[in-house]
Image (cartoon, rainbow, N blue to C red):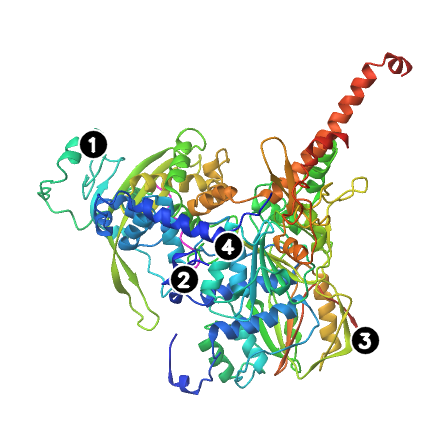
């Protein structure tokens, strides 16, 4: 006897209870606090802020806890919260040239004004599991402070050094300085998209996706060989300029990583050759993302540079439509929702076609086994 | 009934009526007015992130949130059923955030949000049907680029679609599209009806109710005003036809409704039931009985005619 | 939003922003989905000098900082401009080609309508909506409307429409999918003509 399955509501409630129980884990282990996540899983926190497009460390820590450490789920929580927030103002462009730098390196010059500042980095750690961290916990000695204070003035490699000789392309200045910067969270994206939209899309795009695309440009799926002109990581202040005040006010500091790449040069017999550039900017310390972003940004400038499109990273429509992990995870995972109505349609068709083919085969076989018919044909 | 699904119990009051802020609603409403003025044309809109995943009805939810008012009665179905988990979840979202009445009865609803089905019962002028749409672009699988498909719509260049359908006929002897079967709207735009089975396509034509389509991830809204001509694409020698079953609904005996197949065991036995749960319930309440209904005397449950199929 | 001395003269907007704008939108959605049918304005609202109640309600429900409004000389009173700036936050333009919503009185010089944006073949939705203040709308057979949203025919009569308007409307229909949609507003009633509507003028 068939009884239709009911009780979706109870099942959902129970699923939520189970989820909460699993999130808590073994109750003999002390519960993780959001301030611990905020302090000790800080790179997860900044990734969630970057791809969640919302700079709030406490909320990001909460999202990570609520999502059981699933960062894409945490990014989704941040986005869903962000979308309900009213928009009070747009900031002035942040001045990364005035960044309070914690790390700054250039791969194009051995030494340069302002110096190379290694700062906190995994780069030269040996990737050996540190079992003492497990056995004894953390108890690091205070890091020594620098012998010389960091220069206040930290010239930018591309704008202040290479551009001094005219060796690198100028960033095109907008036709209308006061024209609003595009915002894909407020307006539907239209193609071909401007560089402002592309950069916004990359900055909040999935780290793994942008990484893979950046990587692909290094393996021949684009040809715009890049040097890291400069990476800088540190804090910058954010300013807004309310209409009624008419002057900017500082509303706080954010951490940013900025990467500028120096790419394959352009020029001709009559035009002075110049290097081209790619740009990456992301919340928090994330060099992997900012370098990848700069590579993909440069690749996506193919049209502007008159380059032939030969790889997916150069195809801005492809990149932009697939970079958002909240969109892609939703749609990829939605195929676990019931589709039995559609499937029924396919089943009906496949069965009908099978019946037809079987009938045809049966007829052919009958014809074959009947030589008379054959002879008559 | 137990506590509600979501964790919004404490936080619902922190959000605006029907969740979306008024500015977002206005943006969606403007898109909706354009959509009804250009039937079948996909209006781009700045879809917002919703508290449910993309691909799970965010477009339909945004359209419903922009349209719904305190006087409305909402019905939500997925695969034709009110009790599928995602339908339950969306219905509760609106019960919570808009405090509106909800119903499972098609006849009592003023707004019906649906995924993959059109109710069997004929809809009225005072009803609105909101479809959840995953891929709004009917040409997308022929041409993945938006820049290209937009040109094709602008130029009414639909030859590729006909070629695709005809290739099906050449290869399979049939048009192999069984759901999301493309339609021509008012002789101008080719439109994706969302992944409803083609069985439902004829219901869209000249429907008395307003039909609204929301694609959240793809950020498109489109519409069919009431009494709009909607024709399924076909060929003179291969006219459009809908699915039919040799079976009836095991519960209500309906032969005119879309049937879901229910697997009864691992020996190939199966039965069919109406996909539209309200339609089936209403028929049963009116005394209709199918062969597998529990009111039937024991032993009358006939096994599926699976083995007889080949005899067709 | 800057509050200045004028604020005290401002008329109130909707009593309940969410419910009232929803009610007005639903009427507009019905009207645009069923061209030629006449609907009652569902809310009470006081109109500033230069507009009428239905026009005011329509703009408050549909316009905001993301939409540009153009007001005809007859509508562009100080009171109307201040009202829309305050309640909608919309930029008011004097360039009719930039308007998302163009508002005019039916008895004014309507020659501007040919300059309204009609969208383009790829984005026909990027077109203006014309809100026309009229004295009366009725179901007399002045215009016999056919097309999407209309079962057989809808009859609509709008007081004061000129032959020039009808000629423009017919041309507008032929631009489809581009074109301008029109909303007729009296103090208490709303009717619309979508660009799809075919009209036989009697």
**Dot 2 and dot 4 within a common chain:** no
Residue A47 drawn at (x, y percent):
32, 46
Direction from residue A348 to residue B64 in the image, left or right: left
**Depicted B272 relative to depicted B266: above or below:** below
Same-subunit check for callouts 1 and 3 = no
Q: Is residue A240 above or below residue B220?
A: below
Do we see residue A78 in this rendering? yes
Q: Estimate the x, y position of residue A240 in percent, counting from the top left.
A: 31, 63
Rounded to the nearest angstrom, the CA distance separating label 3 from label 4 is 52 Å
In the picture of the structure, the residue carrying the numbered disc 2 is A178
Residue A126 image offset from top left, x and y in percent: 20, 29
Main secondary structure found in the magenta portion: loop
Name the residue beneath numbered marker 1: A124
Kindly state the secondary structure of the residue where label 2 is placed. loop
In the image, which disc is placed on residue B88? Answer: 4
Question: Relative to the observer, which residue lies in front, B75 or C146?
Answer: B75
- Part of the protein shown in magenta: A167-180
């Amino acid at each position: 006897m068939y009884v239709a399955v009911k009780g979706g509501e109870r099942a959902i409630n129970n699923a939520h209870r189970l989820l909460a129980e699993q999130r808590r884990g073994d109750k003999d282990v002390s519960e993780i606090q959001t301030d611990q996540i905020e302090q000790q899983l800080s790179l997860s926190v900044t990734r969630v802020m970057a791809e969640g497009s919302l700079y709030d460390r406490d909320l990001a820590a909460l999202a990570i806890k609520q999502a059981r450490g699933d960062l894409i789920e945490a990014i989704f929580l941040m986005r869903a919260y962000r979308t309900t927030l009213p928009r009070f103002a747009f900031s002035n462009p942040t001045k990364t040239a005035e960044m309070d730098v914690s790390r700054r390196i250039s791969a194009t010059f051995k030494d340069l004004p302002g110096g190379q500042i290694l700062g906190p980095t995994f780069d030269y750690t040996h990737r050996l599991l540190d079992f003492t961290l497990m056995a004894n916990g953390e108890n690091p000695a205070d890091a020594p402070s620098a012998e010389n204070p960091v220069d206040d003035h930290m010239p930018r490699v591309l704008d202040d050094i290479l551009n001094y000789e005219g060796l690198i392309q100028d960033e095109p200045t907008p036709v209308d300085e006061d024209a609003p910067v595009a915002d894909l969270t407020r307006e539907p994206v239209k193609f071909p998209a401007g560089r402002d939209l592309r950069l916004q899309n990359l900055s909040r795009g999935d780290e793994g996706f942008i990484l893979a695309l950046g990587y692909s440009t290094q393996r021949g799926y684009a040809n715009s060989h890049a040097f890291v002109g400069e990476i800088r990581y540190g804090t910058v202040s954010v300013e807004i300029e309310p209409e009624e005040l008419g002057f900017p006010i500082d509303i706080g500091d954010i951490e940013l990583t900025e990467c500028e790449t120096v790419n394959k040069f352009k020029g001709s017999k009559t035009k002075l050759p110049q290097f081209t550039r790619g740009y990456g900017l992301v919340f928090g310390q994330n060099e992997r993302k900012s370098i990848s972003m700069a590579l993909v940004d440069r690749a996506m400038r193919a049209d502007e540079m008159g380059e032939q499109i030969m790889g997916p990273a150069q195809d801005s429509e492809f990149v932009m439509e697939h970079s958002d992990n909240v969109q892609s995870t939703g749609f990829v995972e939605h195929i676990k929702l019931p589709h039995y109505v559609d499937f029924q349609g396919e089943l009906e068709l496949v069965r009908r076609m099978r019946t037809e083919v079987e009938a045809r085969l049966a007829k052919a076989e009958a014809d074959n086994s009947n030589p008379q018919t054959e002879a008559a044909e | 009934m137990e506590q509600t699904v979501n964790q919004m119990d404490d936080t619902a009051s922190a959000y605006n009526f029907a969740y979306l802020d008024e500015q977002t609603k206005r943006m969606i409403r403007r898109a909706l007015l354009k959509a009804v003025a250009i039937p079948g044309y996909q209006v781009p809109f700045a879809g917002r992130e919703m508290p449910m995943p993309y691909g799970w009805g965010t477009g339909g939810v945004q359209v419903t949130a922009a349209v719904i008012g305190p006087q409305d009665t909402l019905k939500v179905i997925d695969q034709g059923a009110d009790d599928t988990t995602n339908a339950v979840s969306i219905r509760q979202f609106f019960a919570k955030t808009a405090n509106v009445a909800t119903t499972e009865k098609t006849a009592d609803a003023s707004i019906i949000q649906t995924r993959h089905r059109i109710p069997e019962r004929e809809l009225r002028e005072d009803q609105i049907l909101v479809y959840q749409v995953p891929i709004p672009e009917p040409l997308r699988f022929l041409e993945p680029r938006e820049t290209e498909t937009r040109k094709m719509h602008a130029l009414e260049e639909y030859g590729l679609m006909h070629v695709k359908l005809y290739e099906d006929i050449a290869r399979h002897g049939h048009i192999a599209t069984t759901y999301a079967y493309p339609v021509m709207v008012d002789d101008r735009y080719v439109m994706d009806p969302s992944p409803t089975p083609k069985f439902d396509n004829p219901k869209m034509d000249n429907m008395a109710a307003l039909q609204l389509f929301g694609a959240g991830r793809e950020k498109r809204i489109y519409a069919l005003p009431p009494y709009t001509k909607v024709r399924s694409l076909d060929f003179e020698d291969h006219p459009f036809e809908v699915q039919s079953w040799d079976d009836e609904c095991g519960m209500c005996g309906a032969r005119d409704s879309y049937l879901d197949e229910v697997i009864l065991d691992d020996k190939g036995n199966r039965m069919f039931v109406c996909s539209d749960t309200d339609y089936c319930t209403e028929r049963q309440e009116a005394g209709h009985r199918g062969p597998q209904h529990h009111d039937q005397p024991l032993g009358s449950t006939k096994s599926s005619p699976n083995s007889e199929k080949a005899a067709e | 939003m800057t509050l200045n001395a004028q604020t005290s003269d401002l008329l109130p907007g909707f009593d309940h922003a969410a419910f009232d704008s929803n009610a007005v939108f639903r009427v507009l959605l019905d009207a645009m989905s069923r061209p030629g049918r006449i609907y009652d304005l569902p809310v009470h609202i006081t109109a500033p000098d230069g507009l009428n109640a239905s026009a005011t309600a329509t703009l408050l429900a549909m316009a905001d900082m993301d939409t540009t409004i153009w007001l005809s000389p007859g509508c562009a009173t100080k009171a109307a401009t201040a009202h829309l700036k305050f309640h909608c936050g919309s930029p008011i333009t004097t360039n009719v080609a930039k308007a998302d919503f163009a508002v005019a009185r039916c008895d004014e010089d309507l020659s501007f309508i040919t300059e309204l944006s009609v969208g383009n073949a790829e984005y026909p939705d990027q077109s203006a909506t014309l809100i026309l203040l009229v004295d009366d709308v009725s179901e007399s057979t002045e215009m016999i409307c056919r097309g999407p949203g209309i079962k057989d025919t809808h009859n609509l009569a709008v007081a004061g429409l000129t032959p020039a308007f009808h000629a423009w409307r017919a041309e507008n229909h032929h631009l489809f999918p581009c074109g301008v949609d029109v909303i007729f507003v009296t103090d208490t009633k709303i009717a619309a003509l979508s660009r799809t509507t075919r009209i036989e003028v009697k």
